[in-house]
């Protein structure tokens, strides 16, 4: 953050402070207690198990399906998010975006480190009494592609400040996956951290055993979890990661919640599913539980069951497979420029709804970042359609430009649900 950005953030913080000052706030005390060998979170004196969403959109859906908390990553739009969450009965894991080395933050720059602490001090003082606050999330994946261990000292200084300024809410820091070095560094350099937050995907099941083996004895939260990450899946011959279908993702989410999150009743105090919203990250469909137009995917059915114990009355379509020229997603399909190509998606619907199909061709994304940093969405390619069966089969003419592409299919059931899949292919003479 440069000087101009720093002063802009202070101005915005002052504006938020004035807005908060209009209504007296009463904090809800949050405590952690170890009872009979189990960690228990209490909020307002009552046991509180986190059934959380990562994001602050579609909150009515979150409440309807049984969620009780949301996670933010930074103080942007804080008062509006906190107020809406409180109105809907949701708590907030309030994120403080600690500078990341991969984004250019230098922990040898003492002035920058001091300015960061001062800024967060003002943030905590401003929002600490809001009744929606659950915990303070100090840093997200600051360990990703880093080398300066002083970041943990800085995080500890922030956590210490929080404990001094706000006695009502615990502190947390979040790492990218789990590593014995990070666990030890946090224990040694950041003892003011109360809760360990873990962002994990394909490796979720079994992470409870690893955390214990690495020496953590306190409570933890799975702060991001979802499908197989784009770094965890097979790749085509040209290096394109193969994305799960929405149906495969739903199966993964259910298994990871049942056998990973809910299974650890001693140390895990809840989770935040990722992503409660929509974003471009490797593809436009990889992580978001909603499509751009707000349509829900099959993962939502699983979450509603996991949180409330009830399946929705109408469930999402199921995609069994997708292929191009008879080659599946793992076959590294090559086609020629201008070639007539057939794409087929095998789809069923548990409610026998009439389905509609939408196809979209995108070039393979080249704007790939780390740690969830913002990426740009590739522009769709105009497709010359030869025949559209409107039942999961599309015949189209391949573009003349060589390179890597993906064909996406979106299948709608008319009840606000959709299934998605995509298949990578390469155009080559």
Image (cartoon, grey):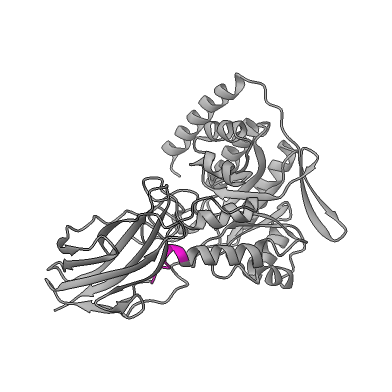
- Residue ranking furthest to the right: 36
The residue at the point 56 percent across, 47 percent down is 113
Residue visible at 67% across and 64% down in the picture: 185
186 horizontally vs 32: left or right: left
Judge left or right: residue 342 versus residue 290. left
Q: Nearer the viewer, residue 61 or 154?
A: 61
Name the quarter where the N terminus is drawn. top left
**Image quadrant where residue 69 sits:** top right
Q: Say whether residue 246 is magenta.
A: yes
Q: Please tell me whether residue 226 is drawn above or below residue 193 in the rendered image.
A: below
Residue 353: within the magenta?
Answer: no
In percent of width and height, residue 100 lies at: 51, 55
The residues colored magenta run 242-247
> As drawn, which residue projects farthest toward the front?
352
Query: In the image, is residue 19 above or below residue 339?
Result: above
Q: Residue furthest top?
A: 22
Is residue 182 in view? yes
**Image-quadrant location for residue 395:** bottom left
Q: Is residue 95 visible?
A: no
Q: Residue at x 20, y 58 (%)?
A: 381
């Amino acid at each position: 953050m440069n000087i101009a950005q720093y002063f802009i953030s202070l101005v915005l913080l002052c504006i938020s402070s004035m807005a908060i000052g209009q209504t007296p706030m009463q904090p809800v005390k949050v405590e952690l207690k170890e009872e009979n060998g189990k960690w228990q979170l209490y909020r307002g004196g009552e046991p509180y198990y986190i059934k959380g969403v990562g994001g602050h959109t579609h909150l009515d859906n979150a409440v309807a399906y049984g969620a009780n908390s949301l996670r933010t990553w930074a103080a942007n739009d804080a008062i509006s998010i906190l107020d809406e969450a409180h109105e809907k009965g949701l708590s907030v894991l309030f994120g403080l975006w600690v500078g990341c080395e991969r984004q250019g933050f230098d922990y040898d720059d003492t002035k920058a480190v001091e300015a960061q602490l001062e800024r967060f001090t003002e943030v905590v003082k401003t929002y600490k009494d809001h009744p929606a606050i659950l915990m303070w999330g100090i840093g997200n994946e600051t360990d990703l592609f880093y080398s300066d261990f002083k970041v943990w000292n800085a995080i500890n200084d922030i956590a210490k400040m929080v404990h001094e300024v706000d006695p009502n809410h615990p502190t947390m820091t979040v790492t990218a996956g789990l590593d014995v070095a990070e666990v030890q560094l946090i224990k040694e350099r950041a003892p003011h951290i109360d809760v360990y937050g873990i962002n994990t995907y394909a490796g979720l099941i079994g992470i409870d055993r690893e955390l214990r083996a690495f020496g953590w004895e306190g409570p933890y939260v799975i702060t991001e979890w979802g499908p197989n990450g784009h770094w965890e899946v097979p790749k085509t011959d040209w290096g394109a990661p193969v994305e799960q279908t929405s149906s495969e993702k739903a199966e993964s989410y259910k298994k990871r919640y049942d056998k990973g999150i809910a299974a650890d009743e001693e140390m895990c105090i809840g989770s935040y599913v990722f992503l409660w919203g929509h974003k471009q990250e490797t593809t436009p469909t990889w992580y978001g539980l909603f499509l751009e137009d707000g349509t829900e995917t099959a993962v939502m059915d699983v979450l509603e069951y996991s949180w409330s114990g009830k399946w929705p009355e109408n469930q999402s379509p199921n995609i069994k497979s997708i292929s191009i020229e008879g080659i599946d997603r793992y076959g590294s399909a090559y086609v020629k420029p201008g070639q007539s190509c057939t794409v087929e998606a095998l789809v069923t619907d548990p409610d026998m709804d009439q389905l509609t199909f939408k196809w979209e061709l995108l070039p393979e994304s080249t704007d790939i970042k780390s740690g969830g940093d913002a990426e740009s969405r590739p522009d769709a390619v105009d497709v010359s359609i030869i025949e559209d069966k409107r039942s999961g089969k599309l015949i189209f003419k391949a573009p003349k430009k060589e390179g890597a592409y993906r064909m996406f299919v979106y299948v709608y059931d008319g009840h606000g649900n959709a299934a998605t899949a995509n298949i990578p292919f390469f155009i080559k003479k």
